[in-house]
Amino acid sequence: MTSRVVAVTGATGFLGRHLVRALAQDGWLPRVLVRRDPIHPLWREIEVEVVTGDLKTPGALGRLCDGAEVVVHVAGLIKAASLEGFNVVNRDGARAAARAASAAGARFILVSSLAAREPQLSNYAASKRAGEDAAREAAPDALIVRPPAIYGPGDTETLGFFQLAAKSPILPVLSPASRIAMIHVLDAAAKLADFCKNPISGLIELSDVRRDGYTWVEIMSAAGVVMGAKPRFVRLPDTAILAAGALADAWSSATHTPAVFGFGKARELLHADWTPSSAPMAERVPSVFGLIDGFSNTVDWYRSEGWLPKNIVA
């Protein structure tokens, strides 16, 4: 029996790697668009079809989508020097993928970001909203999925966060009124895999078991708990965060090196409500991880892979 094909862009990224594995475990044949033949530990025991190229390679998206039942567009850019730099990937890439999916008769799922809800905050957020609009125009029945901050095994972005929690007696926090949704990568991948299996369209915002999100103190406290530390917390003024963002932008401009953190990202961090607004009933697969067990799972993986020492003394 021929397996049903699901096409995935951004498959070698943090979320994409876990999604491909979840799809294969669900009985799909994942077909991925990559610049080179991927070799990853998560894929050792599964079958993956490879289409060589990227979003701009002539004919690559057509080959990726041909015969696929579902197309999941995960590819995106998290740092760029300008709005147009973001839009080239986050808007134009989403449009191209949606058009290719429609031409192939495949359902289209766009993995966006919760940041898209507030496009005025940053170039990144604006580009993700523009990508949603472009995808809907090309594929009106598309499903738009907005995950919040994603963490978990294999994530390089949060490694420094846990290293800081282990070593520093003082951890910074922002406004006590802010609420931040989080999601473990395995939960995010499981939900996306279920959306492939059970057709749905519209807009869904994801979260972990706490849909009302966490305060900054709760997030930092959880990091301290899993690292065996008991840090004190210091509130950073909003002006200091914004100033740091402006300085980061100036340095990026001077060195021609785009960075994730800048003035726009600072504005995102200071936004008071990053909790999902859509009803959880649309998510047929409930989240498994909360913050403490999710962080523990992540740190256990870091230690098993040698990214963190086996035993850290605060």
Image: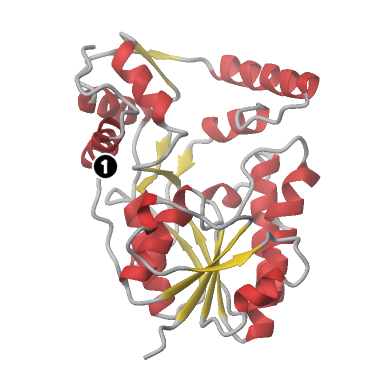
Which image quadrant for residue 33?
bottom right
Q: Is 172 situated above or below 209?
A: above
Q: Position of residue 81 (x, y in %)?
A: 76, 35
**Residue at 65% from the left image edge and 29% from the top image edge:** 259
Q: Which quadrant of the figure contains the C terminus?
A: top left
Report the colour scheme.
Answer: secondary structure
Whether residue 57 sits left or right of residue 63 in the image: it is: right
Which image quadrant for residue 24?
bottom left
Q: Observer-nearest residue: 194 or 242?
A: 194
Residue farthest to the bottom, as pictured: 1
Residue farthest to the top, as pictured: 169
**Which element carries disc 1, helix, strand or loop?**
helix
Q: Which residue is mark 1?
A: 294
Q: Is 106 situated above or below 116?
A: below
Q: Position of residue 49 (x, y in %)?
A: 50, 71
Q: Position of residue 29 (x, y in %)?
A: 43, 75
**Residue at 75% from the left image edge and 19% from the top image edge:** 250
Which image quadrant for residue 206?
bottom left
Is residue 311 in view? yes
**Residue at 25% from the left image edge and 34% from the top image edge:** 304
Q: Is 283 situated above or below 66?
A: above
Q: Is 63 situated above or below 164?
A: below
Is residue 279 in view? no
Mark 1 Cα shell of 10 Å, populated few (<14), some (14-19), many (≥20): many
Q: Which quadrant of the figure contains the N terminus?
A: bottom left
Residue type highlighted by circle 1:
Gly
Q: Observer-nearest residue: 275 or 127?
A: 127
